[in-house]
Image (cartoon, rainbow, N blue to C red):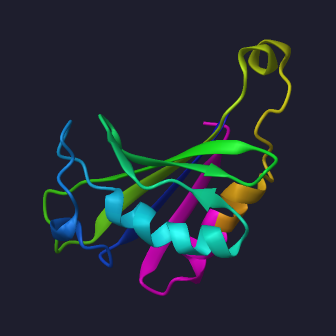
Amino acid sequence: MAHVITFRSSMFNIAAETPNPINPIAGQSVLIWLREPLRKSGYQTTSPEAEDWGWYIDVTDGHASYLVGASGDAADAAALVEWTIQVVKHRSFIEKVTGAKRMAADDSLSAVIERTLRAEPEIGAVEVEKGA
């Protein structure tokens, strides 16, 4: 079960992002911006890395680890961009088979990301789908 958060914003500088060497999909700037609020909330993050669907960071808090991905349409860097953030909790094969340690609807990392987005005046239309 993943949480998918979408929002709209023009505050991220897509033109300044490192080009994604796999597909021309933006997301690095969102993750760079998100790393500081996550750090302040007690999470450790890796640097953003490219993937064929966008960019991702690994996030840990000592109890769980996650993949947090971000992607947005980079066609017009000056426009209001629709962004997607995916939050996926890492689980072992045995945990998946037995259904243990599933990502809960009230997952703390997902909640921190949602609060951070909603608190930013230049970000709007925040929607969260839990269990995607």
State whether residue 78 is above or below residue 81.
below
Query: Which is more toward the observer, 130 or 48?
Result: 48
On screen, residue 16 versus residue 60, left or right, reads left
Q: Quadrant of residue 38?
A: bottom right
Residue furthest to the bottom in view is 121
Query: Which is more toward the observer, 38 or 53?
Result: 38
Q: Position of residue 43 (x, y in %)?
A: 68, 62
Total numbered badges shown on the rendered structure: 0
On screen, residue 61 versus residue 35, left or right, reads right
Q: Quadrant of residue 28?
A: bottom left
Q: Position of residue 110 (x, y in %)?
A: 67, 56
Q: Residue at x 61, y 51 (%)?
A: 59
On screen, residue 44 versus residue 72, left or right, reads right
Q: Residue at x 19, y 39 (%)?
A: 23
Q: Quadrant of the C terminus?
A: top right
Q: Does the magenta segment cover residue 1?
A: no
Q: Does the magenta segment cover residue 129?
A: yes
State whether residue 102 is above or below residue 112.
above
Q: Position of residue 51 (x, y in %)?
A: 33, 37
Q: Residue at x 52, y 67 (%)?
A: 35
Q: Quadrant of the N terminus?
A: top right
Query: Which is more toward the observer, 97 or 84?
Result: 97
Q: Residue at x 56, y 60 (%)?
A: 127
Q: Quadrant of residue 3?
A: top right
Q: Position of residue 39 (x, y in %)?
A: 63, 70
Range of residues picked out in magenta: 113-132
